[in-house]
Amino acid sequence: MSDKVIRFGGSHIGNPKALANLQSWLKNDDSRTYVVVSAIPELLQLIQSKLDLVFIQELDETKLIAELSGFYGQVTTAEVTAAFNQLAKQLSGLLKGISLIGDYSPALRDQVLSFSEKLSVEILAAVWSGAHILLPEEIGLLASSDFGNATFLSLNIITVNQLENGVYLVPGTYGITDSNKVVRTGKTAADYTAAFFTRELGVKALKLWGLDNDFQRANPGIINSPEVIGRLTYAEASELAYFEHYSFHPRTVEPLEHEHIPIQVIDAASADGKVTTVINTETWVEEQIVKSVACTDDISLLKLDGPGVGLKPGILAKVTSQLNNAGVNIKSVITSQTSINFILSEENGTKAMNLINDLGFSAVTDIAVITDVALIGIVGHGMQQAYGVSAKIFAAVANNKINVMLSGSGASDLVSYLVVHKADKEKSVREIYKAFFGA
C-alpha cells in the first residue's frame, strides 16, 4: 500500500472518539502513515502568553512546568514522561533566558513557539500505542529563513524512504533553516506542512482529519446549521481560509495545485474515513453560483483620497512596499480614480497609517483609518459568466437598508467583497444567504 499523509488537528488530541476513529481507519494499513499534528490550541495560547509577558512579570518556572504537565494529565491520565518533562524544562529555560537578556529575535520567537507542537506530539504519542515521533530536524525538512512565515524548500527523501512501515507523528508548522535554526511557517500551518509532505512523497491525496470549522455555506454562528460544501476549487478554499470561521491555512494549496493533488476533508466523527469536502482543480459551478457567504470584522480600512490619486503613478507601489517592509499584511486593495482603499487586519490599521503618513504624497489630500467595519465575501466560481449575481447581492442589502461603504467585484471570477459597518455584519450575511440559498 502507498504512504499516507494525514493532518490531525491539535483540538482533536483531547477527543478520544476522533482519535479512536482515525486509529480504526488505519487498523489494517501496512504502509507508512505520516500524521502531521498541529498544537493543542490552549497549549499554544499558554506559551504565547508567557512569551508576551516575559518582560512584564517574572517567570515562575515551577508554575509553568506544572501548567504544561496539566495538559499531559488531562489527555493521558498518566505520569508525565521524561521526554515531555525535558521539553518543558527546555522551554522554561528559554523563556528565563529571554527575560534576562531583555529582548528576543524572530528566530528565538519561532523556537519558543515550536514547543507548542513538540509538546502536543508527545501528548498524542502517549495515547497512541505504537506511533513514533518524527521531528522535522530528523528528516531534513528545510525551510526558508522568513521567521514566522517561512516557505518549505525540501525534504530528505532518502532518509524518509528508509523508515519502516508504521505511524509517524510529525509536529507541524515548523522546519529547519540551512543554518539549523527552527523556523515556523505560520501560527497554525500544520495543513501547509502536511501538503508539502504529500507532494514531496508523491502521495495521491492529502487528508485533513476533521476541521475545527467545516467549509459551510456561512458562519454557523449566524446561520443555523448551514450545509457543508461538498466541492471546492483550490482558489475557493484559499479565499475562504482568510475568514476566521474556516479553519484552513491559506497556503495549504501551494504545494498541491500544480501537481493536481486533491485535498479531502474527513469527518472526524466517522470511523470509515467519510469525505465531507473535496478540494481540487476541477471547477464546479453550482446552480446558484455562490458557494459561501463569508464574513469577518477583524478588518480596518486604510483610505488614501485625493483628486489626483488615479493620475499620479507610484502611489500604490510606495504604500505596498512600505507596509511589506514593516510586515503588515494587505488583505485586499480596492481602488478608484480618487481613492485607494487597503483592507487590513483591525490591529494593523493605525500602524499602517503611521507608516505611510510621512511618505509625502502630493496627490493625496486625506489619509484615514476606519475600524468600525466588517468584510463580507461572497465566494463561488462563475460570477463573471452568470447574469444577475451582483444584482442579487446588492438588492439583498439595499432592500434591507444596509449601507455598503465599499464594494469590489469583477477582479476575480470567484469573489465579490462588501465592506459594511460592524453592526450590519450579521444582517448582511443573513440577507445575502437568503437571496441565494433561501430562508
Image (cartoon, rainbow, N blue to C red):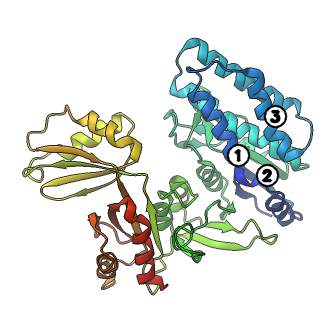
Q: Where is residue 60 in the image (x, y as percent from the top left)?
A: 71, 21
Q: Which label's residue is closer to the chain start, 3 or 1? A: 1
Q: Of callouts 1 and 2, which one flags the residue occurring earlier in the amino acid sequence?
A: 2
Regarding residue 140, the answer to whether it shows in the image is: no
Q: How far apart are marks 3 and 1 (CA)?
A: 13 Å
Residue 436 occupies which quadrant of the picture? bottom left
Q: What is the spatial separation of the Cα atoms under label 2 and label 3, in whole angstroms?
A: 14 Å
The disc at residue 40 is 1
Q: Which amino acid does label 1 sit on?
A: Ile
Vertical arrangement, residue 351 with respect to residue 292, above or below: above
Snapshot quadrant of residue 143: top right
Secondary structure type for disc 3: helix
Residue drawn at 12 percent across, 55 percent down: 338
Residue at (52% x, 69% y) in the render? 222
Q: Foreground residue, 366 or 278?
A: 366
Q: In x, y percent, where is residue 152? A: 56, 43
Mark 2: give few (<14), some (14-19) or many (20+) Cα within 10 Å: some
- Residue for point 40% across, 66% down: 377
Q: Is mark 2 on a helix, strand or loop?
A: loop
Instruction: From the image, tell me which residue sits under label 2.
Output: 14
Residue annotated with mark 3: 69
